[in-house]
Image: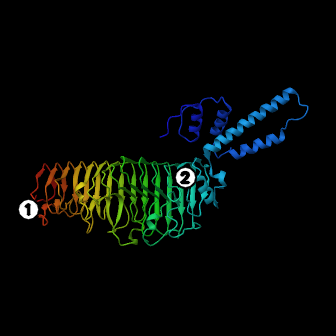
């Protein structure tokens, strides 16, 4: 957030960019009067620097100092010259601080190619103010050379259609900031719509190292990324990786608020936001609130990855993540994750997810592994807390942990409170799967056969489910543990609906001498229906 304006001039400038909503002081100086007039009339609306310059020149031509003028008339003319000189300074001051796409020749009618003007505007390193109602059409990749991007769209829109020129192995995004802008420190965008509906400009087939670099915005090594009150939509017959792709040493914050993102691309992918942070110096913050992320395809709506040694703190508040599954069966690869947290760094990843819906509501499919997936390919910690959330994937797992040969799920922790957790159908029949620690309280759980199982772990993990309602369609057990090894199990005060036959603990074939369950407490549960527990 910008510093609170203090001086009169700072208040006027802050008012122009929407960062100040307090009382505007009565203008006194000429510069304040000019800025006040701009505040009232609106930047890019009724008044513009070009119009002011034209008026100045016209006044000078029409009002030269005439021979024989009276002293009073001469003084008035000289005063007018002084006023005009001050006005010119004001115009220069404005031009040095703010730019509009129209200054670089943009038309903004949605028909004219404004690619050059938009690229030059983004390369200005000045605050960018767009015209309300303008539609800026781009027909090629935009490669700005900038160290900062500050855009207030004022409700303007950037659009692209079938006239967009895509060059294989050259275009890695509609807006590519790390090609020329190697030191982009700030990316701040608000009140700007993106509407890209085009066919044939992105790859329909998976091409190594290409489709992953075809987002709408590709940003690398930016210190601060702020997006607010935006609506970004992309639709195509072919596939693209994401609407927003952020990677590199983003060492301050990524804030995304009050915005809607929708990816309707067919083909190999269809993600929305991917954040890959690499930082070894200080902790990083990612925050998302009051946003909706929608897709029809089969890739992550939201993927956050900590690839460094510093800790990453990610918060999601009051958001909606939905996969409608319109193109879900385009590819047989079972990798669709509606929301994912991928982790390859040595720092810890902490996620707080509150009052958020994470849901697959499309056609029946076995291509969706899980609604929320924790994936750790090294011995790195992930700690996920969810409160008041809905996590739903009726054709697979609701929550899943994953690991590779290089690592294990021993550091994957889930804490769910007052959540609705729905998953399991067909061969993917477990609601929650392969998480190291699971603590569930006051939740409603629906699934196919069982709630969870564990792979071999090398530390004592906990499975706790308390005061929850559990309904399994074809129950195997209240808990399924595969390869038991030092577990603490607490199943207390729950209501189970279904015919449960037993708890299920499978012997540890990897370590036959593994100890039994360290602590098992199963009490005060209510079983509705026949049960032999």
Residue 345, x across and y down, in percent: 32, 56
- Residue at the spot 59% in from the left edge and 64% down from the top edge: 139
Provide the secondary structure element on which disc 1 rests: loop
Residue 392, x across and y down, in percent: 32, 58
Q: Are marks 2 and 1 in contact (CB under 8 Å)?
A: no
Instruction: Give how far apart the Cα atoms at labels 2 and 1 are.
Output: 62 Å
Q: Please tell me which residue lies in front, 377 or 430.
A: 377
Provide the secondary structure element on which disc 2 rests: loop
Q: Please tell me which residue lies in front, 33 or 366.
A: 33
Residue most toward the right?
68
Picture layout, residue 354 above or below residue 240: above
Mark 1 highlights which residue?
Answer: 513
Q: Can residue 317 be seen in this snapshot?
A: no
Q: Earlier in the sequence, mark 2 or mark 1?
A: 2
Mark 2 highlights which residue?
Answer: 146
Horizontally, residue 516 falls left or right of residue 243, namely left
| Image disc number at residue 143 | none
- Residue at the spot 68% in from the left edge and 32% down from the top edge: 30
How packed mark 2 is, by other alpha carbons closer than 10 Å (few <14, some 14-19, many 20 or more), is many
Horizontally, residue 113 falls left or right of residue 399, namely right
């Amino acid at each position: 957030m910008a510093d609170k304006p203090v001086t009169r001039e700072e208040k006027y400038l802050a008012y122009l960019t929407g960062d100040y909503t307090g009382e505007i002081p009565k203008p006194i100086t000429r510069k304040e009067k000019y800025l006040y007039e701009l505040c009232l009339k609106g930047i890019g609306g009724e008044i513009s620097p070009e119009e002011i310059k034209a008026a100045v020149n016209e006044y000078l031509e029409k009002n030269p100092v005439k021979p024989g003028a009276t002293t009073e008339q001469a003084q008035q003319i000289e005063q007018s010259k002084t006023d005009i000189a001050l006005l010119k300074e004001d115009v220069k001051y404005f031009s040095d601080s703010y730019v509009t796409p129209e200054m670089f020749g943009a038309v903004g009618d949605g028909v004219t190619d404004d690619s050059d003007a938009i690229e030059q505007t983004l390369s200005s390193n000045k605050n960018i103010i767009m015209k309300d109602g303008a539609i800026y059409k781009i027909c090629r990749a935009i490669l700005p050379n900038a160290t900062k991007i500050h855009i207030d769209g004022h409700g303007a829109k950037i659009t692209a259609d079938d006239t967009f020129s895509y060059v294989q192995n050259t275009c890695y995004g509609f807006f590519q900031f790390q090609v020329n802008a190697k030191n982009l420190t700030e990316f701040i965008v608000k009140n700007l719509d993106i509407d890209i509906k085009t066919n044939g400009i992105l790859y329909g087939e998976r091409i190594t190292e290409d489709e992953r670099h075809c987002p709408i915005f590709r940003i690398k090594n930016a210190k601060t990324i702020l997006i607010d009150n935006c609506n970004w939509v992309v639709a195509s017959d072919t596939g693209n990786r994401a609407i927003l792709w952020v990677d590199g040493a983003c060492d301050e914050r990524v804030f995304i608020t009050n915005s809607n993102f929708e990816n309707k691309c067919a083909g190999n992918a269809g993600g929305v936001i991917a954040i890959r942070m690499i930082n070894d110096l200080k902790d990083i913050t990612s925050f998302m609130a009051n946003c909706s992320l929608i897709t029809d395809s089969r890739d992550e709506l939201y993927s956050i990855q900590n690839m460094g040694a510093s800790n990453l703190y990610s918060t999601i508040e009051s958001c909606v993540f939905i996969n409608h599954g319109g193109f879900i069966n385009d590819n047989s690869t079972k990798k669709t994750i509606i929301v994912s947290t991928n982790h390859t760094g040595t720092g810890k990843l902490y996620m707080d997810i509150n009052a958020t819906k994470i849901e697959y509501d499309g056609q029946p499919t076995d291509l969706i592994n899980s609604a929320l997936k924790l994936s750790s390919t090294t011995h790195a910690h992930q700690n996920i807390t969810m409160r008041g959330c809905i996590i739903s994937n009726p054709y697979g797992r609701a929550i899943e942990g994953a690991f590779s040969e290089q690592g294990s799920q021993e550091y994957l922790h889930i804490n769910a409170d007052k959540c609705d957790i729905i998953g399991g159908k067909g061969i993917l029949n477990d609601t929650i799967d392969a998480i190291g620690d699971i603590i569930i309280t006051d939740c409603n759980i629906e699934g196919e056969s069982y709630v969870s199982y564990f792979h071999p772990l090398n530390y004592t993990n906990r499975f706790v489910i308390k005061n929850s309602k559990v309904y399994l369609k074809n129950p195997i057990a209240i808990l399924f543990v595969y390869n038991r090894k030092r577990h603490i199990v607490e199943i207390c005060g729950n209501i189970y609906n279904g015919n449960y036959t037993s708890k299920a603990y499978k012997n540890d074939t990897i370590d036959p001498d593994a100890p039994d369950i360290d602590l098992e407490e199963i009490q005060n549960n209510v079983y509705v229906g026949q049960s032999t527990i």
